[in-house]
Image (cartoon, grey):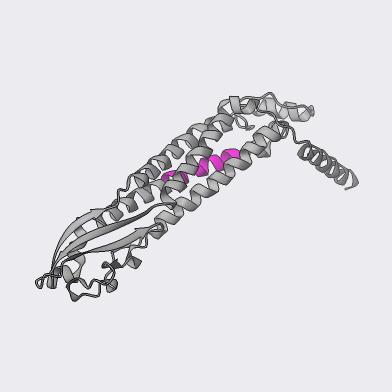
């Protein structure tokens, strides 16, 4: 028992020394493992920024029997709870004597949008932590058997979740375009009963298209980087890693 406690203290002491020995080493950024992580960091920023920062509106031109024509507008944006986006007429104008605030767009796509943005933010933060580890604690990462394995597992899970979140968000975006497009006229009671409505315009959703593209780009980057993270684990060369640990040395770098 005493010997086991002594070994634990020794290992903890060595780990503490390594953690305190922060030393910047930019060479990992020149290798695929670090370089791709930088690309993942940038791609995650574009993913959540292009989606989370979107604001738009859809306009409908209304023609009334009595001639008090006008344009009504519904503003919407992230997180795309369209069922809370009501129509508004111009100030001091009562278009067709209808209280347009009682009429809203159709659909709630907040779950897909928020899942996508939240996951992208978490991946952005993880990339920062991983880069700090790669650059500041290179020897600790190379000498550890657990850190590369944890990094590898997270990379695989992240690849799968990028696929899921991007697919869900792409489907939600398609539905948002339909809900804010020409079909909205068929869902508005005033347009069916009291007035003649014509679809005016809707804000361009090019930035949202870009967010979907960056979602799948992230999936490709994380999936490709999985190989280089795998090369750092003991699964790639278990005999060499075990031998180096038994000798107290640092295993030769395979991906950094």
Residue 38, position as x, y percentages in the image: 55, 34
Give the number of callouts. 0
Residue 130, position as x, y percentages in the image: 62, 39
Residue 64 in which image quadrant: bottom left
Residue 32, position as x, y percentages in the image: 55, 27
**Residue drawn where x is 44% and y is 56% of the image:** 114
Q: Nearer the viewer, residue 122 or 207?
A: 207
Question: Does the segment drawn in magenta span residue 231?
Answer: no
Quick check: can you spot residue 150?
no
Q: Nearer the viewer, residue 120 or 6?
A: 120
Q: Nearer the viewer, residue 37 or 156?
A: 37
**Residue drawn where x is 64% and y is 32% of the image:** 234
What is the quadrant of the C terminus in the image? top right
Quick check: can you spot residue 69?
yes
**Residue drawn where x is 35% and y is 48% of the image:** 170
> Which region of the structure is painted magenta?
150-163
- Position of 42 relative to 53 (above/below): above
Question: Does the segment drawn in magenta span residue 154?
Answer: yes
**Residue drawn where x is 41% and y is 49% of the image:** 51
Give left or right: position of 96 versus 90: left
Give left or right: position of 218 versus 199: right
Residue 115, position as x, y percentages in the image: 45, 54
């Amino acid at each position: 028992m005493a010997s086991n406690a002594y070994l634990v203290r020794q290992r903890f002491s060595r780990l503490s020394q390594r953690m305190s020995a922060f030393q910047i080493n930019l060479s990992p950024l020149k290798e695929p493992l670090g370089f791709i992580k930088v690309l993942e960091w940038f791609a995650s920023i574009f993913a959540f920024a292009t989606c989370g920062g979107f604001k738009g509106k859809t306009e409908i031109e209304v023609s009334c029997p009595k001639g008090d024509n006008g344009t009504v507008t519904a503003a919407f944006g992230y997180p795309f709870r369209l069922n809370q986006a009501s129509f508004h007429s111009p100030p001091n104008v009562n278009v067709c004597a209808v209280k347009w605030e009682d009429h809203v767009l159709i659909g709630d796509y907040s779950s897909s949008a928020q899942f996508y943005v939240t996951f992208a933010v978490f991946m952005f933060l993880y990339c920062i932590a991983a880069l700090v580890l790669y650059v500041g604690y290179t020897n600790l990462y190379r000498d550890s058997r657990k850190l590369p394995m944890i990094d590898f597992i997270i990379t695989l899970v992240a690849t799968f979740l990028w696929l899921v979140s991007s697919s869900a968000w792409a489907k939600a975006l398609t539905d948002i375009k339909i809900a804010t497009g020409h079909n909205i006229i068929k869902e508005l009671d005033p347009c069916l009963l009291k007035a003649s409505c014509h679809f005016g315009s809707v804000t361009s959703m090019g930035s949202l298209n870009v967010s979907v593209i960056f979602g799948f780009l992230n999936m490709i980057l994380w999936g490709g980087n999985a190989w280089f993270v795998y090369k750092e684990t003991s699964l790639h060369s278990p005999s060499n890693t075990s031998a180096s640990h038994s000798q107290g040395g640092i295993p030769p770098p395979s991906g950094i």
